Image: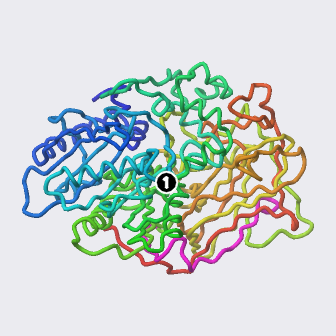
Amino acid sequence: MNRVTLRALVCLSPVALAGLSTHGPAALHAQQSEAEQRVAELAGRYEKSEHRVEMRDGTSLYLALYEPRERRAEELPILLTRTPYSCNPYGPEQMPPRIGPNRLLEDEGYIFACQDVRGRFQSEGTYDNMRPHVPGELPIDESSDTWDTIEWLVQNVPSNNGRVGMWGISYPGFYAAAALPEAHPALVASSPQAPIADFFFDDFHHHGAYTLAYWFITPVFGYQQDSLNTGNWFRFPTRTSRDGYKFYMDLGPLENSDAVYDSTNFFWQQLVEHPNYDEFWQARNILPHLHGVDHAVLTVGGWYDAEDLYGPLNIYRTLERENPDIAYNGLVMGPWGHGDWARTLSPHVIGDIEYGDDISGWYQREVEAPFFRYWLNGAGAPPEFDALTFDTGSKEWRAFPAWPPVEADTRTLYLRDDEVLSWQAPSAGEGEFTEYVSDPNEPVPYTDDIRFVFTPRRYMNEDQRFAERRPDVIEFQTEPLEEELTLGGDVLVRLQVSTTGTDSDWIVKLIDVYPDDTPNGEHTPEGVVLGGYQQMVRSEIFRGRFRDSYEFPTAFVPGERTAVEFPLQDLLHTFKPGHRIMVQVQSSWFPLFDRNPQTFVPNIFEAEEKHFVKATQRVWHTPAAASRLEVKVLPPGSGLKMGSD
């Protein structure tokens, strides 16, 4: 396979779609050969049938069913996934290269089912992005559609044992999460993996900032089909450059998108019409509905998932808080990019950094397969952990009875004068602030690579030396550590800032700075130097207009000092002796996120060229106005170490 057409692209999962942006022709050819071999294996072991399942409102949804050809004496459980990305290939004789969460489960012999959600591909109805959950039997939502589908499965599939499990990665992970409220009694095990939880904080937005890097794939979600389809019914925009930075700078202000996405692209219109966290986005937040859940749930995510990191962490937290009678609530967070746990990566290298061997395979063998095996078949034992998290610094698994770990001690890292990061608060007589000039017409790039990607991935643990060299990025760092330091849990940013503009974004990056004499590893990519490497551990953007309210934005008063506070996502990372901790602060992150014009306008999607102006940004660090990060520090030896050999 030398070329992947757009028609083929749309039928791929987001996991596969992201992979196409970073792998060359040789890797794609190898994947194609392996997929063809797996198709033949599955076709020999499973019989496929296609069905139309009627929902309670009369809408008919497509369902592909895969049953073992070799009939067994015992009844079998069903594993269901629901997707907006197509259950292709269609036709009873056409087999995909994958029908379950992993190959182990496929080889063990379950009944697998895949469903196109309403309004997509072979399913009738109208599609709605993150369709709101509405308690009760009517109107319909994703929970009711799942309930009706499971009811059909247990009533119409011969030899099922009455137990159903759900799984899905990315958007299918959301559908697994959306089925948790008011779940069908036959649903006994769910695994939302990289699930979206809230579109204003996850995926297409981060704290209200629009994820510009997703602009190109808006057609996937923005056009309604007018008939049943086996392929795509929309087109991607013309890509005019291989350089993503240049492509999006040439696009100009977001208002220029109207020439590309007209009124028929309903999702783009929703983005433009709802720039704030209003009722429209609030209704699409699944978290308030995650109560009354009593069956087993295993939520899975990756520390380096650029698309859906907020979702897994907050779905797990909400389930833990709101469901004291849940059969089991587990969290797995590994050293993975989006969906990497479903791949075979050995050695396991993310970006430039190696994390070990067979990490994904170990998870599939020792965690995922046993989870479904126990709750669906009653075989084996339930998981012995509540939270299984990978330490991305020491590069080992650690199991905890809760997340964040209860033994964590909250400590404060202060941003101080002369680029110092310290556990000690600023003292009188130090410089009051560190300043830089932010120019939205020369924004800070989010990556050092010159490339165009469908969805960004690599930047999550990328070397930040390229950013440190820019005058519009300021940094603060500790002295080399004398002892190892493990941070585990959430991080809260508390900045004291001022700007000469009336609006501003604030990006904070927590970084592990390697010693200058760090040698390259066996699998370090060519051209990479680990000596002095600035590995990003965690980062986040905050749109400053939302500092008081996400629903009702307010302008900055030029020159007036104000507090800007927001959470970074969780982490588990050990900084080794000799390493430094660094914090970088900047006000643009392009083209990962859209440019803040730095002039307050009611709607940034409608900002004009004249609104994009330079601004002088100050980060204050006085005793009375101390900018800082609150972190969770774990005692040495915390957590039960688990092997992945």
Answer above or below: position of 93 versus 208.
above
Along the horizontal axis of the image, is 263 left or right of 362? right
Q: Nearer the viewer, residue 462 or 261?
A: 261
Q: What residue is shown at x 54% (from left), y 45% (from top)?
A: 203
Colour convention of the picture: rainbow
Residue under label 1, please give it. 135
Q: Amino acid at mark 1?
A: Pro
Is 95 situated above or below 3?
Answer: below
- Whether residue 398 is in magenta: the answer is yes
Q: Residue at x 38, y 32 (%)?
A: 10
Position of the C terminus, as image quadrant, is: bottom left
Which residue is at 56% across, 42% downward?
204
Name the secondary structure under disc 1.
loop
Residue drawn where x is 71% and y is 68% of the image: 413
Q: Quadrant of residue 164?
A: bottom left
Of 3 and 401, which appears nearest the observer? 401
Q: For the magenta stretch, what is the residue range?
A: 395-420
User: In the image, 133: left or right of 45?
Assistant: right
Vertical placement of residue 489 versus 150, above or below: below
Instruction: Answer whether residue 290 is magenta in the image.
Output: no
Residue 182 location in percent, x, y?
42, 58
